[in-house]
Amino acid sequence: MDIFEKCRDFASTGFYESYGHRVYLRPLRPSAHPGEVLINGRSVVMAGSNDYLGLARDPRLAEAAVRATRLDGTGCSGSRTLCGTRDIHEQLEDACAAFLGREAAVLAPSGFQTNLLLAGLLGKDDVVLGDRHNHASLVDAVRLAGARYHRYRRDGVARAERLLSEAPPGAGRVIVTDGLFSMEGDLCDLPAITALADRCRARVVVDSAHDLGLLGATGRGVPEHFGLEDRVDLVTATFSKSLGSAGGVLAGPAEVINFVRCRARATVFTAGMAPSVAAAALAALDIVRTEPERRTRALEVAERMHNGLRALGYDTGNSVSAIIPIPIGDKVRCLELWQRLLDAGVYVNPVIAPGRPEGQEMLRISFTPVHSDAQLERALEAFAAAGRATGVIPRTPPGSFTPVRIARPPALAQETARPRSAAVPVSTATVR
């Protein structure tokens, strides 16, 4: 059989141009208005990016990237092992290790590739447990290594413990998990995971792609949020979310990082990160450290929009983060809601098969600290009209709703605490 046959049969139009419009791979351009993008020359509110701290267009990152380009050029022309290492790489690695409280760190040119570095550490006899909603890059790392991979549900700790206890003698035991799940917006149960690891003498790897810079008292992510940094063995993260750049980092014990740096195919056989990208990430890391008010504002906006949408009758699932999922459960209705929102000037992400199983279609939404109050209000008005027109929400708002309380550092959480089970009358809910 010709391997190209599947390409001829692939219904690309059905996926990329669903609902009669170009849904995916749509070109976006920067707008003169922060928090907005241009689509076909029209400025719309961007409510679908991973730019959680609003740094992707910060002039300080751009200036750092320009300076690095002038100093080191546009690319490294080789792997880090041979001729691709620059001073800016070592500066960023040292800064990441210090920020995360780890002995050492190693970079990779993308977040996906960062997780593939784990394949250099795993062997075919090792047993790896992973949350069933882990990012594809974590799954592919285990597959690339040929290790034995078992997925667990978040409520399936007992089964997970049995799988670890049945590992062959001499096999390594590892638990890998997203810190903040990219679609659902909820957190891993790190206390249960680390307790399981202690009982089964397993190592713990947390992918902080979506929580680095956003969660924890100083922005170090989910391990800091739970106060369990010393119980997590390795942390992976990407710079393409809160840090407004690209690439990623793996941080942990120096001996482990040195081994991965020299043995992982994902770093030995790839060109070094572009100097401009590394410089932008380094500048962003400094902003995360010195401007905690960005993180505070991001969490305030997230909570406000969660509860503003809930007051309208939307379900935002179990998310406690800047990621706001709206389950729809029907492809046509999901895309119709997406189109009506875009027509009203709000860009969100529709997630359908293969991104989600059929029957679990959803919208994925996020806002940033650079969104103005007027933009947030405009977005809620669009959601009200579009949701009622498509029947996703009732025409009359519910009398009350269960509020979301965003995951915050303990001190901030106490200041804004409200019992999660408390029903808030819609008449008292405000988005201003």
Image (cartoon, rainbow, N blue to C red):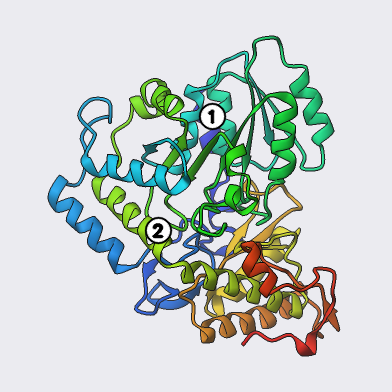
Say which element carries label 2: loop
Specify the quadrant of the image occupied by residue 62. Answer: bottom left
Which quadrant of the rendered structure holds the C terminus? Answer: bottom right
Q: Position of residue 92 (x, y in %)?
A: 32, 45
Q: Quadrant of residue 157?
A: top right
Q: Which residue is mark 1?
A: 141
Would you say 278 lies left or right of 174 here?
A: left
Is 371 situated above or below 250? below
168 w.r.t. 411: above or below = above
Whether 423 is drawn above or below 99: the answer is: below
Q: Which residue is mark 2?
A: 244
Residue 112 appears in view: yes
The quarter of the rendered structure image containing the N terminus is: top right
Question: Could you tell me if residue 9 is visible in this image?
Answer: no
Residue at horizontal 27%, vertical 26%? 81
In the image, taking residue 199 as reference, residue 245 lies left or right, namely: left
Front residue of 167/412: it is 412
Q: Residues within 10 Å of mark 1 (few under 14, many from 20)?
A: many
Residue 54, which numbered label? none
| Helix, strand or loop for disc 1 | helix
Residue 9: x percent and y percent?
A: 57, 38
Front residue of 86/431: it is 86
- The three-letter amino acid code for the residue at tag 1 is Ala
Could you give the CA–CA distance between mark 1 and mark 2, rounded to whole angstroms?
24 Å
- Mark 2 Cα shell of 10 Å, populated few (<14), some (14-19), many (≥20): many
What residue occupies the far bottom of the structure in this picture?
427
Label whose residue precedes the other's in the sequence (1 or 2) = 1
